[in-house]
Image (spheres, rainbow, N blue to C red):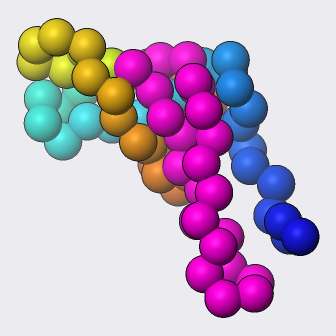
Amino acid sequence: MLKEAPKYKEGDTIFWYCDEDQRVHHAKVLFVNYALFGSHCVDINYEVLDECNGPAVTRFIDESDAQDRD
């Protein structure tokens, strides 16, 4: 059973800082991914489509990096 709920859901807009271009990016969450480590630790990341320095690519934003706004 999942013990930790994600902060965001599919369709929410999240913001994160991109180290590649030193800017804050934003995108809508396409999928919420869960990885269970042991019986109590859950790693959550958000799958988004982002255009950073070129064509749109799928990125996985860790929950600790996702913010409500820039």
Residue at image x 39%, y 20%? 49
Q: Nearer the viewer, residue 68 or 33?
A: 33
Q: Nearer the viewer, residue 18 or 60?
A: 60
x and y, in percent, of residue 6 in the image: 74, 49
Task: Specify the segment rendered in magenta.
Answer: 24-49
- The vertical placement of 3 against 55, above or below, is below
Give the quadrant of residue 22: top left
Q: Tell me if residue 33 can be seen.
A: yes
Residue at image x 12%, y 36%? 20
Q: How many marks?
A: 0
Q: Nearer the viewer, residue 34 or 25?
A: 34
Q: Give yes or no for residue 45 being in the magenta stretch.
A: yes
Report the side of 52 relative to 69 (left or right). left
Secondary structure mostly taken by the magenta-highlighted segment of the chain:
strand
x and y, in percent, of residue 41 in the image: 67, 79
- The vertical placement of 48 against 36, above or below, is above
Q: Give yes or no for residue 54 being in the magenta stretch.
A: no
Report the side of 23 relative to 37 (left or right). left
Report the side of 22 relative to 14 (left or right). left
Residue at image x 34%, y 28%? 58
x and y, in percent, of residue 36 in the image: 64, 73
Figure quadrant of the N terminus = bottom right
x and y, in percent, of residue 4 in the image: 81, 64
Give the quadrant of residue 18: top left
Q: Tell me if residue 70 can be seen.
A: no
- The vertical placement of 5 against 10, above or below, is below
